[in-house]
Image (cartoon, grey):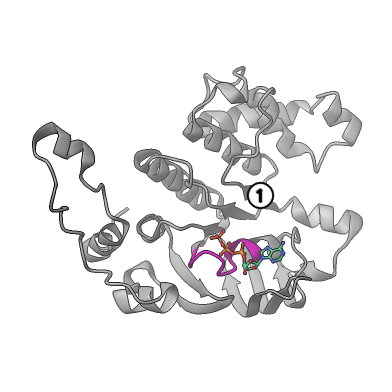
Amino acid sequence: MLTLTGVGKRYPTGDRALTDIELTLPKGQVMALIGPSGAGKSTLIRCVNRLVEPTQGSIRLDGTELTKLSGHKLRHARRSMGMIFQEYALVDRLTVMENVLSGQLGYVGFWRSFLRRYPQEAVVEAFRLLERVGLPHAIDKRADALSGGQRQRVGIARALLQSPKLLLVDEPTASLDPKTSRQIMRLIRELCAERELAAIINIHDVALAQQFADRIVGLRAGEIVFDGLPSELTSEILTTIYGEEDWDTTPEPMDDAVSGDEATNTAPINPPYARVMSSIEAGAAR
Ligand SMILES: Nc1ncnc2c1ncn2[C@@H]1O[C@H](COP(=O)(O)OP(=O)(O)OP(=O)(O)O)[C@@H](O)[C@H]1O
């Protein structure tokens, strides 16, 4: 469905962000893209929808070479790629429904969307999507009256309104608490299964990636250093991706740790590496 061949990106500053990326993503597959800061995850996602211009290689979506498109054809191709952002990218002063309908911007003309005259079928579909993402009672609320998790649900509904073939998801849970993060990842996964949508999810939380993705790709310094199943992600592979670290260690309580309620409040919560390893050991439970 999506095929990247020899994709490279060098920014005008001289920074080489991607080198010789080879990837094929079949219909319906949820792929998590992990790697340290600066590894090139956002650049890769943005090369696919051409928010960033790749400097080398080919990107084909259902047979269409995306790197060669411009103008109307590029806008048309972008409709088949829904984007979900870390900071939701909603318009605060607009309602939930209006934000979702803005997913139609690539379809309806500028004046029609400016005057907010959306086709009836788009409104009906937006209702249906808001119901599906769990927000049927919030359609008239302003976006700035929503919690982070609710805002992300609106972002997901907006991306789906354009009936994409592919979801490009950039750090969808970065600002969310652990439970809401799981709910959002589960929702994305379910929607991909229901609609046979492929997804590339750029995510820092390895445990979440492991639990909710079909496949994990690890980037390091712009190169793919791991491409496999969540269950294949061992501590050696984590070291290859992120560098040396004792992935099995759970931090000891500090020497001056206090007891009782105070201790509950100050003890380290869910050390990330321990969580990664415990979820690896537990298998990819969904
Ligand atoms: N607009 C830009 N101009 C110049 N260099 C850039 C630009 N955007 C990113 N880079 C560089 O490209 C490399 C990859 O950056 P990118 O943001 O894609 O990494 P990332 O893996 O998404 O990082 P993070 O997890 O911190 O978001 C880095 O070296 C970064 O400094």
- Judge the density around disc 1: few (<14), some (14-19), many (≥20) Cα neighbours within 10 Å: many
Of the pair 5 and 107, the residue shown nearer to us: 5
Q: Amino acid at mark 1?
A: Gly
How many numbered markers are drawn?
1
Determine which residue is flagged by label 1. 82
Residue 42 counted in the magenta span:
yes
Of the pair 99 and 285, the residue shown nearer to us: 99
Q: Position of residue 113 (x, y in %)?
A: 83, 30
Side (left or right) of 280 relative to 168: left
Side (left or right) of 210 relative to 126: left
Point out the image quarter for the N terminus. Answer: bottom right
Q: What element does badge 1 sit on?
A: strand
Residue 280 counted in the magenta span:
no
Question: Within the image, what quadrant is residue 99 found in?
Answer: top right
Residue at image point 17% right, 38% down: 264
Q: Position of residue 203 (x, y in %)?
A: 48, 57
- Quadrant in which ligand 1 is drawn: bottom right
Which region shows up in magenta? 33-43
Q: Is residue 228 visible in the rendered structure shown here?
A: no
Q: Is residue 60 visible in the rendered structure shown here?
A: yes
Question: Within the image, what quadrant is residue 18 found in?
Answer: bottom right
Side (left or right) of 134 relative to 79: left
